[in-house]
Amino acid sequence: MNDRFLRACRGEPTDVTPVWFMRQAGRYQPEYRRLRARYRLLELARDPALCAEVTCGAVESLGVDAAILFSDIMVPLEPMGVAFDIREGTGPVVSAPIRRAADVERLRPLEPERHLRFVGEAIHRCRERLAVPLIGFAGGPFTLASYLVEGGPSRDYAATKRWMWTDPEGFQLLLERLSEAVAAFLAYQIREGAAAVQIFDSWVGALAPEDYAERVLPHLRRLVQAVRPLGAPIIYFGVGTATLLPWIRTLGVDVIGLDWRIPLGTARAQLGDQQAVQGNLDPAAVLAPWPVVAAKADAILAANGGRPGHIFNLGHGVLPETDPAILRRLVDWVHARPVGEGGRGAHG
Ligand code: CP3
């Protein structure tokens, strides 16, 4: 078993920097597009054999150090009573948005061992086939709430924020219910064999730091406290979170995901070396000519300066227009760099 990724999660030294990519299974792959021509995304996620094929196929063609279970952050919401569709080019669209406490009261508690057995089964199948650790995941409570309240993707999260400020109790109840479901779901994935879990709080960067700290962080704290005892490393990731890092640091997760808008050295200087970092190449940078990609990867490795606890990744998911061969070359490039190449203490 290649344990580079797990060692880096725990801040232990590794031979080379571990690397994987968010959305490493997806439309940029011809084999994924072929499967998607026959099955809907949720059909792939709900069929353990197909899910394992998509999850493991990506690992094998890229040579990455970790697998991420193929699914979607919306999957656990369906058994809670939320009807939605995932539309190509748009994302999740919820049929009846949730905007009042009464809507929250109608949500059913999630029982993963009853409702999401297909996830456990897919985890077992992946584990049989994989030589790298499998990452389980769930959406962060605010990010899930944003889809439920807006009814789909949003630019400004106006309905979500309006509710958060005008009916704080109702909105807090929604975050509470979602956090409980997410905690149960992550714990279930760990029990079934996920070696680490990532909380995708993709859209929290839309919040002012004070609102994040007052209205979202307490739920995340309880979530992390509930999952911690299971012993699997926890990764917390959001987009545009540079100004939230002082708060995220206090969550006590093992790994903090960084997008590309903050230099890794700057984040490291703020976070200290107690927690590992993951990232942070601009997902669009892999569309550039190879020398540009290689230079940007080297700059990130140099910014980390050889400190243990760095997992190389993109700052967000792989874009559909990405050339799979460039990603593969990037993995090999990172693996060919001895840790510490950039020189210790190079902040930048
Ligand atoms: O390889 C992996 O990373 C695992 C698979 C994965 C998917 N969704 C599959 C998927 C993961 C980890 C997710 C999480 C997810 N889903 C997030 C958090 C991560 C992030 O990107 O910030 C969010 C916000 C969603 C909601 C969602 N689902 C969006 C915004 C989209 C994109 C819509 C589009 O067409 O561009 C989806 C659809 C989706 N989920 C795809 C994939 C591979 C797109 C391809 C398809 O429709 O087959």
Image (cartoon, rainbow, N blue to C red):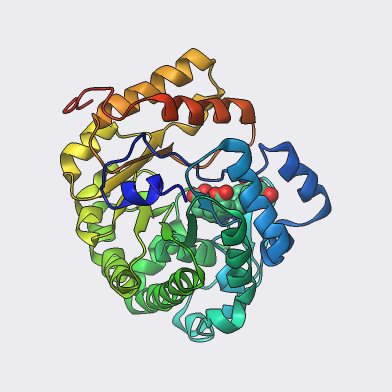
As drawn, is 129 to the left or to the right of 238? right
Residue 67 screen position, x and y as percent: 53, 50
**Going 32% across and 46% down the picture, which residue do you hit?**
8
Q: Residue furthest front?
A: 1
Residue 251 screen position, x and y as percent: 24, 61
Camera-nearest residue between 101 and 263: 263
Q: Quadrant of residue 347?
A: top left
Residue 332 screen position, x and y as percent: 50, 28
As drawn, is 61 to the left or to the right of 31? left
Please identify the quadrant where the C terminus is shown: top left
Camera-nearest residue between 248 and 52: 52
As drawn, is 241 to the left or to the right of 106? left
**Going 62% across and 50% down the picture, which residue do you hit?**
56
Residue 183 screen position, x and y as percent: 41, 73
Vertical placement of 246 versus 114: above or below? above
Camera-nearest residue between 130 and 142: 130
Vertical placement of 244 versus 159: above or below? above
One can see residue 203 in this view:
yes
Q: Residue furthest right?
A: 38
One can see residue 81 in this view:
no
Number of numbered discs on residues: 0
